[in-house]
């Protein structure tokens, strides 16, 4: 029975990752410790044997695997010797080297889930330091597959890019949706109806795209070939260079991930 401790496990992402893993029995409640500033967080009521604490030392003493899920600015307050343990970090902007130095750890996995983990729909790339064992990798892969699709990658540069592409991605989709809602409202559509319409559009359009045998580029081409209203919209968006601001946004987010990653 793998004993798991999640520092910041009561936070947004920590809980989104843990609830599916508990529900699937991948983590056994008696073997899980979560820490938070208060020492007691809501959300784990179906699993009353989950240990809750505000002591990260107590958490570490009860864990073979320690998951770090605090905001980067809160990391300096956490001083622990995690040598001999598997350390899994879901934190943006904190490198493998930095984690190894801070926590005296040799077996480290960095992963980048996203907020859709709470719907079990995250895309979660992860990478391992050289000393990580096959059993460690198998555990991480199972853990992250419980909340979506996990995929092993090989470089920290890729992880920084994925931090922008899929880690931050849900916010970018929300920004696109908000722009559509705003346009609808300026055209006289009542806000509530516009919002309902755009939420349903993103759900339906995403499901179509996820299940389609066509690539997104082929879907676009299919609509262009139709030469109707959609083509008129797509051509106007292309003429206004829609790809450039999207690329700028991804580049800025990835640059922040890379710059903040305090490589030593
Ligand atoms: N929220 C998201 O969509 C994503 C977040 N991340 C990463 O996940 C990490 C956590 O982010 P969120 O869950 O969104 O933040 P959050 O603020 O919801 O959760 C962080 C939790 O850590 C707790 N905490 C702070 N200091 C602590 C300490 N010393 N000991 C124990 N617990 C402590 C807080 O009380 C809070 O519950 C961040 O490093 C972020 O980069 C990565 C991908 C997506
Ligand atoms: O915004 C952030 O810094 C974190 C990392 C990716 C998503 N949320």
Image (cartoon, rainbow, N blue to C red):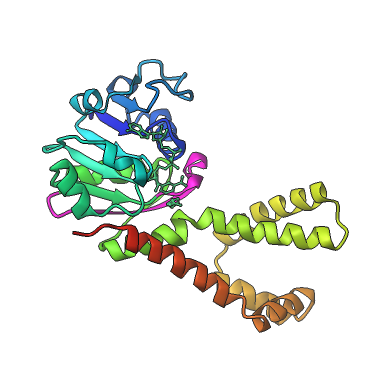
Q: Which is nearer the eye, 241 or 73? A: 73
Q: Is 23 in the magenta?
A: no
Residue at image position (56%, 70%) is 216
| Image vertical order of residue 20 relative to residue 217, above or below | above
Q: Is 120 in the magenta?
A: yes
- Res. 197 visible in picture: yes
Q: Which is nearer the eye, 81 or 165? A: 81
Tally of marks = 0
Q: Quadrant of residue 188?
A: bottom right
Report x, y in % for residue 162: 40, 60
**Magenta segment range?**
113-131
The answer to whether residue 186 is left or right of residue 38 is right
Residue at image position (35%, 16%) is 49
Report x, y in % for residue 193: 82, 49
Quadrant (top left/top right/bottom left/bottom right) for the N terminus: top left
Report x, y in % for residue 123: 43, 53
Residue at image position (61%, 55%) is 174
| Image vertical order of residue 165 relative to residue 101, above or below | below
Quadrant (top left/top right/bottom left/bottom right) for the C terminus: bottom left
Report x, y in % for residue 240: 67, 80
Taking the view exactly as shown, the residue that stands out farthest to the right is: 188
Residue at image position (14%, 43%) is 105
Figure quarter occupied by ligand 1: top left
The answer to whether residue 120 is left or right of residue 26 is right
């Amino acid at each position: 029975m793998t004993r798991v401790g999640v520092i910041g496990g009561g936070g947004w992402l920590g809980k989104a990752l843990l609830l599916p893993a508990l529900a699937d029995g991948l983590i056994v409640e008696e073997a899980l410790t979560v820490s938070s500033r208060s020492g007691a967080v809501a959300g784990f009521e179906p699993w009353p044997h989950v240990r809750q604490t505000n002591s990260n030392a107590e958490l570490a003493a009860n864990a073979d695997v320690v998951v770090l899920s605090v905001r980067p600015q809160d990391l300096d307050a956490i001083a622990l010797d995690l040598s001999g343990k598997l350390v899994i970090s879901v934190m943006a902007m904190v490198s493998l080297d930095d984690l190894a130095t801070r926590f005296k750890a040799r077996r480290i996995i960095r992963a980048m889930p996203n907020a859709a983990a709470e719907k079990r729909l995250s895309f979660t790339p992860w990478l391992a330091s050289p000393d990580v064992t096959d059993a460690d990798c198998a555990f991480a892969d199972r853990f992250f597959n419980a909340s979506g699709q996990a995929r092993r990658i090989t470089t920290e540069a890729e992880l920084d890019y994925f931090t922008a592409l899929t880690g931050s991605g849900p916010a970018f989709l929300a920004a696109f949706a908000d722009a559509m809602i705003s346009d609808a409202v300026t055209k006289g559509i009542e806000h509530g109806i516009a919002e309902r319409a755009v939420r349903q559009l993103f759900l339906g359009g995403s499901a179509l795209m996820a299940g389609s045998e066509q690539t997104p580029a082929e879907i676009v081409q299919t609509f262009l070939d139709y030469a109707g209203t959609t083509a008129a919209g797509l051509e106007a968006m292309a003429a206004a260079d829609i790809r450039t601001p999207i690329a700028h946004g991804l580049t800025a987010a990835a640059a922040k991930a890379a710059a903040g990653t305090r490589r030593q």
